[in-house]
Image (cartoon, rainbow, N blue to C red):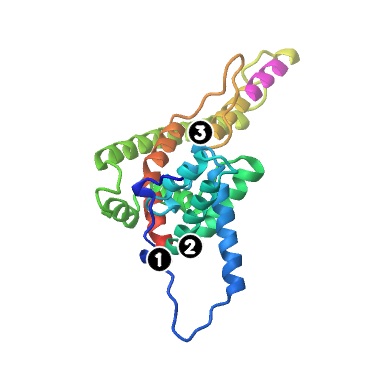
Amino acid sequence: MVVVAPSALYNFADSAEERIPGQRRNRSTQKKEARSVLDVVRGLTSMSAKQLGAVSHLLPPGGMEAVGIAAKLPRSNQGRKRQEALVAKMLRGQLTDPQIEKLQEAVSIATQSRGIFEDGDVSGLVESWREGLLGEDQEVIAEVYGYPVAWAPDHQQLRSLVRQCKEALEEEEQQRQAAEALVASDQASPTGSSSGSDGEGGESGGEGAAEAAAEAAADAAAVAGGPPRRRKGGKAPEPKSRPLVRSLGKLLKPLALRVVAERDAQA
């Protein structure tokens, strides 16, 4: 006998599926769709906690608990099969097609490569917000700060992090411009102008100028967003802004998950 947690119970009266009087339903199509969703549920029960957490925003209330109950039962247990069927019925009744499709993609990724699903709508929204906040886009600022307090990140923390990101990016831009100016200056100066009168000194001076120019160019590229230059005997330095920008994305992600979940539910 399977004991289902109260939060995992599904009220079939809440199903979004409606039967239109006088309209015949294609039973073969319905059975095919039901099997497809059941396959998704079986894939969900095989996921790791981290993989399942990546799709939690796509599941209806009680969905995570219901999947967890099925996952704990032996595969050959009839109770597990009944629980999986219950979860499949829950998903068919409460989720929209876009949500089901995303779950199918997540199961495919987890099965084929053991990877973790990343919702493209969520990551795209985070990137759009991040660029807008750093670029002082007033529409984006109004949108991010306009969501319910229960959804949004702490506004004070968000403002502080945005300010830190902008300061770091401005500092790196100044460094980039200075590095580019140094490269241009070295390239414009005659080779060996600071060396002695002999040819050997001229060659040495030319090599030194070229090396300095190359280092400056590498630094400028790193600051501009390219791969950081690896320094001798140590790890390549990371621009100050990068960890801050990553932190900003992490702070915005929970809000993006909530917004995308609401949009998908209304699709």
What's drawn in magenta, residue-wise? Answer: 202-211
Mark 1 and mark 2: span between their CA atoms? Answer: 8 Å
Determine the secondary structure under disc 2.
Answer: helix
**Residue at the far front in the pictured view:** 1
Q: Which residue is mark 2?
A: 92
Tell which tag, 2 or 3, sits nearer the viewer.
2
- Confirm or deny contact between disc 1 and disc 2 (CB under 8 A): yes
- Residue at x-position 32% and y-position 38%: 163
Residue receiving disc 3: 223
Q: Earlier in the sequence, mark 3 or mark 1?
A: 1
- Give the residue furthest to the bottom: 22
Mark 2 touches mark 3? (CB < 8 Å): no
Position of residue 204 relative to residue 241, above or below, is above
Identify the image quadrant of residue 47: top right
Residue 16 image position (x, y, % from top left): 40, 68
Q: Earlier in the sequence, mark 2 or mark 3?
A: 2
Q: Residue at x 50, y 27 (%)?
A: 238
Of helix, strand and loop, which one carries label 1?
Answer: loop
Q: Is residue 167 above or below residue 57?
A: above
Q: Nearer the viewer, mark 3 or mark 1?
A: 1
Give the position of the C terminus as an image quadrant.
bottom left
Which image quarter: residue 222? top right
* Residue type at the position of mark 2: Arg
